[in-house]
Image: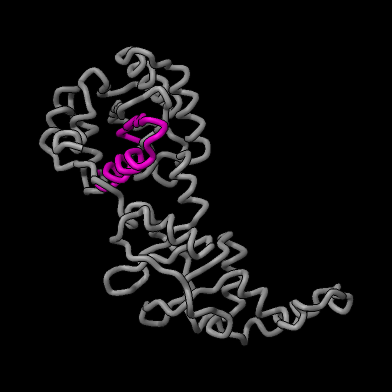
Amino acid sequence: MTDNATHFYSYLAEGNIICRCKARTGAEVVSELARLLARNNAGLSAESIVSEVLAREAVFPTVIAPGLAVPHARLAELDKPLVALASSRDGIDFQAPETGPVKVVLMLLTPGDDPGLHLQLLSALAKDFSTPGEIDKVANLPDAGAVMAHFNGSDLTIPDYLRVRDVMTRKVTTVLEQDTLQRAIELFAVTGESEMPVLDDDGDLRGVVSLLELLKFSMPEHVLWLEDLTPMYRFQPFSEVLKGANDTKVADVMRTEFTSVSESVPAVQIAKLFLVNQIGQLIVVDSAGRLAGIVQLRKFAARLFWE
């Protein structure tokens, strides 16, 4: 990419901007922006855009910050990214009660065979609009010319490549090594997680506890070599573990060896680590070796191949 191409401004056009949008719902604004892009770009179908965008919206909600939605799709017929923007002072209902009405909507369409660029654009937008007041500022701009001037004067650039921090999950369910096994069991049940980082009282990373460790702790190793499990048809070993779950510490069950990756390395390294280690989750650490986030294989693959 050239320096010009890496600036978000280069993907915008005044004709693809709607200020003070009257749409009331997410579906309505998606339809408006799709018609705009189809009208201004030969070979595109508004119906096809709406179908692709809403299909992703149903699986991956695109409200990425309070007041900001980035409905998006990958289209095989594109050879470059297309962006359309709508702003609303009153807010648009994207059925996201936790974040409230959306004031800025950025529709992002990218070539179907360029997942890297797609994720780079999403990451750059999320980072830029995390600046306090940025969403309201854009929402209150009076016209398309003002929007273009705003982004032309901003530092919103597209990175040459993604780093691990751009694709990791920052909100992580954790347990302390001195927590009880019962506490871990409850968290597994409530959160749906299959693996959790274990921290000490100072917040340092000590290990990992997973459902697999829980099963191993419950089943005596010699049982794995038995063909006849008749004596355990009523899950007797698990009963014993549950009886002592409030007295057993997570430290007694966790494993201290795990695969981690620095948040600053290129994100493609994640794919290699998943393949080499045959695992479903990576621990992400910062420069001090402390927990920064996680990357789950299923989410990483979904973002890479489809989101």
Q: Position of residue 48 (x, y in %)?
A: 47, 20
Query: Who's the residue at 47% across and 70% down the image?
Result: 174
Q: Report the quarter where the C terminus lies.
A: top left
Front residue of this view, candidates 30 and 20: 30
State which quadrant residue 68 falls in: top left
Front residue of this view, candidates 183 and 165: 165
- Give the side of residue 275 with respect to residue 131, left or right: right
Q: Is residue 36 above or below residue 297?
A: above
Residue 119 drawn in magenta: yes
Q: What kind of colouring is applied to the model shown?
A: one colour
Return the residue found at the far front.
276
Q: Position of residue 44 (x, y in %)?
A: 39, 16
Query: Who's the residue at 77% across and 80% down the image?
Result: 223
Q: Position of residue 138 (x, y in %)?
A: 21, 34
- Give the side of residue 300 with respect to residue 152, left or right: right
Q: Is residue 259 above or below residue 41?
A: below
Query: Who's the residue at 67% across and 73% down the image?
Result: 215
- Give the side of residue 200 with respect to residue 161, left or right: right
Query: Who's the residue at 40% across and 22% down the image?
Result: 77
Q: Position of residue 187 (x, y in %)?
A: 57, 67
Please give the range of residues in magenta: 102-128
